[in-house]
């Protein structure tokens, strides 16, 4: 009994358990309803690294028509890790899921270590437990760089604090540099959490020399990040003629869009981040922290909120539409909840709150572990196209803005809607650019439309026309 209590009270047990749970259907192709398109924009460059060359500075997507597909995007670190694993085992869709899950679990453990170092073990346990069963639970097994990048940043923050807390140590500052660099390169919003270092910079008890060294190393991080996002991404987009990556908008425009869509924006906080139960706990705990005048926790909340608000306003409507934008703020919300919940004397109430958050998370994210029957409709697309065409033949698919089907066709080309594809003038122009086949999806990602071209295959899922 004592052993069981120790086991259940050890955060490593819950991280491992959640890891095992999320291995369920880990080998699924990226076809779940939520953000399948975002996952295939990660797998495309990874597969292209394997098949057309591993130059990390020139990532390629498959839906740029007759162009090379080279375009500006996040620094493809996750994509490149998929490529490296593929060198050993051959390419598979799901490697990105497992890589993200491993790094995200490591991020949870370092989140725990970071909080435990400055507060209490109970606070660290409660906060990490809540984070495990937050939006983190489902997105840490998607082929996306969001929890992956934040996890790298959290690990980097831990080693950055180690540098301030202990004697100057080259290992700690080096690990801070490496993890934060690749975390923020992988996705810019991951850098929002770095604002907590202001608490160290303005701490009078820390030697000025340490602050100078730390600030200098931080500037070394900023240089390649700024170079990639503000020079190289625009250069790739302009040079190779395909605009794919969203770089934000003006604060003024972002404010207007957030106000116009405030209900969608608020939903990311009260529904997506920690679930309804977690959000209620977050609001209540924020009030308690302010009333109790817990200065450190309150300052962390204020700084991280200001930092994250900048991201929200730069994203504008894009933040409202995509739930994964809330991920960098989820650890902050979990920390605030843990700060108060861990201090409750009624342990049954603590267990009840954590249990409700867990149950809500599993129930609301259950669908992400399965693929709907109609989602499998495009899995044979590559095999069927291989009967009539070569891999370098350009195609067009009626999947609108979704690049997922063209990824599963294992070809390059265009994606568009039925109206554009039914326009014979448009098709004639694309023929001049090399278009060879038209794929009309009937069940998923598109609806049927009849065309006056030669049919080479027709089934319940799609029709393939040859030009």
Image (spheres, rainbow, N blue to C red):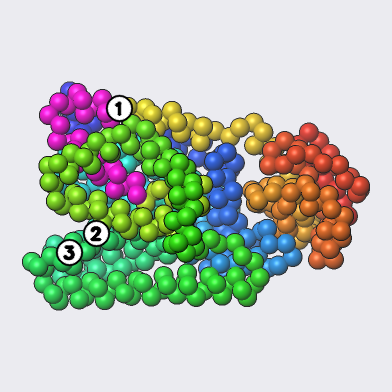
Q: Is residue 449 left or right of residue 14?
A: right
Describe the element under mark 2 as helix, strand or loop.
Answer: helix
Asked if residue 340 is among those painted magenta in the image, a careful observer would answer yes
- Which of the two residues, 402 or 18, is positioned nearer the viewer here? 402
Describe the element under mark 1 as helix, strand or loop.
Answer: helix
Q: Quadrant of the N terminus?
A: top left
Examine the image and state in which quarter residue 156 appears.
bottom left
- At a point 49% along the width and 62% down the height, the residue shown is 249
* On screen, residue 129 above or below 176: above
- The residue under label 2 is 196
- At a point 28% along the width and 73% down the height, the residue shown is 217
Camera sees residue 228: yes
Contact (CB < 8 A) between labels 3 and 1?
no
- Which of the two residues, 382 or 338, is positioned nearer the viewer here? 338
- At a point 21% along the width and 29% down the height, the residue shown is 350
Q: Nearer the viewer, mark 2 or mark 1?
A: 2
* On screen, residue 163 above or below 318: below
Residues under labels 3 and 1: Cα distance?
Answer: 35 Å
Q: Which residues are magenta?
A: 329-354
- The residue under label 3 is 200
């Amino acid at each position: 009994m004592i052993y069981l209590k120790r086991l259940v009270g050890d955060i490593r047990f819950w991280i491992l358990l959640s890891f095992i749970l999320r291995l369920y259907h880990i080998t699924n192709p990226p076809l779940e309803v939520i953000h399948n398109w975002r996952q295939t924009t990660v797998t495309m460059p990874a597969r292209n690294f394997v098949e057309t060359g591993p130059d990390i500075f020139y990532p390629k997507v498959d839906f740029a028509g007759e162009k090379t597909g080279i375009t500006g995007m996040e620094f493809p670190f996750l994509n490149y890790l998929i490529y490296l694993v593929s060198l050993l085992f051959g390419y598979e869709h799901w490697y990105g899921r497992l890589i993200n899950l491993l790094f995200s679990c490591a991020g949870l453990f370092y989140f725990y270590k970071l909080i435990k170092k400055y507060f209490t073990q109970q606070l660290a346990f409660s906060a990490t437990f809540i984070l495990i069963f937050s939006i983190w639970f489902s997105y840490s097994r998607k082929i996306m760089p969001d929890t992956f990048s934040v996890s790298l940043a959290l690990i980097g923050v831990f080693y950055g604090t180690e540098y301030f807390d202990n004697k100057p140590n080259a290992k700690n500052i080096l690990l801070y540099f490496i993890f934060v660099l690749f975390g923020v390169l992988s996705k810019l919003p991951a850098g929002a959490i770095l604002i907590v270092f202001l608490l160290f910079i303005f701490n009078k008890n820390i030697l000025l020399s340490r602050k100078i060294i730390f600030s200098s190393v931080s500037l070394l991080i900023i240089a390649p990040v700024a170079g990639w996002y503000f020079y190289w991404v625009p250069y790739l987009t302009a040079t190779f003629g395909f605009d794919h990556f969203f770089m934000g908008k003006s604060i003024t425009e972002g404010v207007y869009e957030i106000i116009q869509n405030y209900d969608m924006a608020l939903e990311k906080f009260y529904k997506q981040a920690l679930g309804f139960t977690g959000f209620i706990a977050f609001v209540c705990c924020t009030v308690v922290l302010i009333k109790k005048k817990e200065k450190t926790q309150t300052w962390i909340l204020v700084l991280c909120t200001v930092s994250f608000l900048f991201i929200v306003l730069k994203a504008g409507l894009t933040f409202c539409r995509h739930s994964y934008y809330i991920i960098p703020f989820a650890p902050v919300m979990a920390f605030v909840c843990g700060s108060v919940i861990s201090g409750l004397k009624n342990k049954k109430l603590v267990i009840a709150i954590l249990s409700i958050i867990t149950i809500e998370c599993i129930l609301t994210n259950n669908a992400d572990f399965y693929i709907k029957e109609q989602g499998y409709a495009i899995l044979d697309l590559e095999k069927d196209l291989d009967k009539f065409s070569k891999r370098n033949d350009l195609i067009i698919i009626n999947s609108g803005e979704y690049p997922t089907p063209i990824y599963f066709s294992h070809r390059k080309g265009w994606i568009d809607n039925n109206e554009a594809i039914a326009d014979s003038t448009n098709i004639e122009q694309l023929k001049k650019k090399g278009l060879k086949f038209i794929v009309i999806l009937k069940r998923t990602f598109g609806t049927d439309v009849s065309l006056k071209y030669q049919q080479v295959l027709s089934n319940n899922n799609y029709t393939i026309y040859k030009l």
